[in-house]
Image (spheres, grey):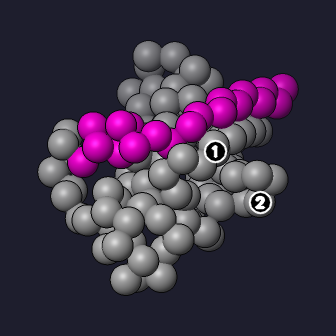
Amino acid sequence: MCVRTRCTVKITEEKVKQYSLLSGDQNPIHQNKKEAKKYRFKRPIAHGMLIMGMGAEICSVLRNKDFFVSDYEMNFQKPVYVDDVIELVVKDPSPSPWVEIRGTVEGKQVVKGNLRFKKI
């Protein structure tokens, strides 16, 4: 059986600010337009770990409490900017322990990753 799940999230300035406070990552490229432009970004970018966290959250519905995440990798192909709307799609190729995650903004792929579950 193959299960697909998806979520669409707007990356707001408030989400990025809250993540900065929770994570301690105060890099100004996430909140300051001028600083982001110094590094050739159009505007402030979302934290990679914020995007990964959203991916892990939607994957969690695929396994019960007897499983844990043992491996997780994500390739960031393009920046995810503040005010972007990202659609994350998860494909669970059961019975494989690997789950594929893809993220798109305006139809263009921005992230691709894999997450593996192991039974406790």
- The amino acid type found where label 2 is placed reads Lys
Q: What's the mark number on residue 86?
A: 1
Left or right of 100, for residue 116: left
Q: How far across and down, in percent of the image, does residue 88 sit?
A: 66, 41
| Quadrant of the rendering where the N terminus is positioned | top right
Secondary structure at badge 2 equals: strand
Secondary structure at badge 1 equals: strand
Report the residue at 55% width, 58% height from top. Answer: 80
Neighbours of disc 2 within 10 Å: few (<14), some (14-19), many (20+): few
Q: Which residues are magenta?
A: 1-20
Q: In this view of the protein, which residue sits in the foreground, 5 or 107?
A: 107
Going by the picture, which residue comes out furthest to the front?
A: 34
For the question of whether residue 80 can be seen, the reply is: yes
Residue carrying label 2: 108
Q: How far across and down, in percent of the image, does residue 44 sit?
A: 42, 61
Q: Are marks 1 and 2 in contact (CB under 8 Å)?
A: no
- Does 102 appear above or below 54? below
